[in-house]
Amino acid sequence: MSEGERPRFRMASLGPGALSDSELLAILLRTGNSGESVVELARRLLAEADGSLSQLFRMSADRLRRIKGIGECKAVTIQAALELGRRFYNEDYVTSRKPLVSARMAYDMMRPVFKGIDHEECWVLFLNSHNYPTSRSRISSGGGNSTVIDVNRIVRMSLDKAASGIILMHNHPGGDPNPSEADIRQTDSLHTACNAVQISLIDHIVVADDSFYSFSDSRMYFK
């Protein structure tokens, strides 16, 4: 590979935005194998993830190490880089200082939190009286297809944080955002408990990759 074709040279001269996913991976991998350039190794690694960075994010370190040419060091480097990227997109959720006035805004804010994970997690956004987010907390992390909505804990945390309203969010890794019967029952219980202490349950949003379901938009339990 000529110097002008090498990913590091292209990044230095053109910037990271000009590089393909495989070229950026090649920079992380640094070296290839005998008979295989680092770019070829990066392309093969990406192919193992069906060309998807989300799939690559889901790969465990053990799974990565089993790929020919990816040892402990390369596996850890890949996971660290992907996690840094995820944290970067999460970092400015409060400092944006925009009131959350729609389910779409809440979904866009929290989508990076749920992207790529293969289990259900439940989060709460705490809002002030003007619907500005003041903080957020992960309430539970469940198995592959279920999580627990701890109503008492959510109410206690909301009172401790002096929240005027909350938005509950959890994900469905299977890809279907429609709420289950358990989701509906637990949302009903939380809605009742919040009303009792004069905290507004503004919405419950179920996230499934590129789609979401909003209880509020569907006018379910939010009278």
Image: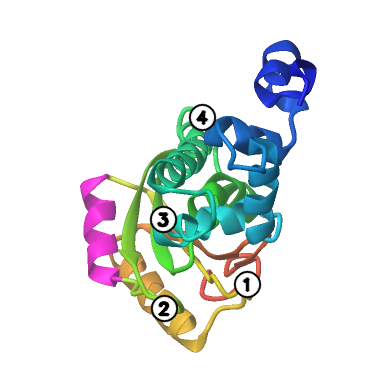
Q: Given contact means CB atoms under 8 Å apart, are the residues at marks 1 and 4 in contact?
A: no
Q: Nearer the viewer, mark 1 or mark 3?
A: 3
C-alpha span from label 1 to label 4: 30 Å
C-alpha span from label 4 to label 3: 37 Å
Quick one: which residue is furthest to the top in this view? 13
Which numbered tag is attached to residue 175?
A: 1
Nearer-N-terminus badge (1/4): 4
Position in image of residue 161 (x %, y %):
26, 45
Tell me the residue at 67%/38% (across/down): 37
Tell me the residue at 54%/33% (across/down): 28
Residue 154 belongs to the span the image colors magenta: yes
Q: Which residue is mark 4?
A: 97
Q: Nearer the viewer, mark 1 or mark 4?
A: 1
Nearer-N-terminus badge (1/3): 3
- Rendering colour mode: rainbow
Nearer-N-terminus badge (3/2): 3
C-alpha span from label 1 to label 2: 13 Å
Q: Which residue is mark 3?
A: 61
Circle 1: is it few (<14), some (14-19), or many (20+) Cα within 10 Å?
Answer: few
Q: Given the image, on which type of amino acid does mark 2 rest?
A: Ser
- Specify whether 153 is left or right of 41: left
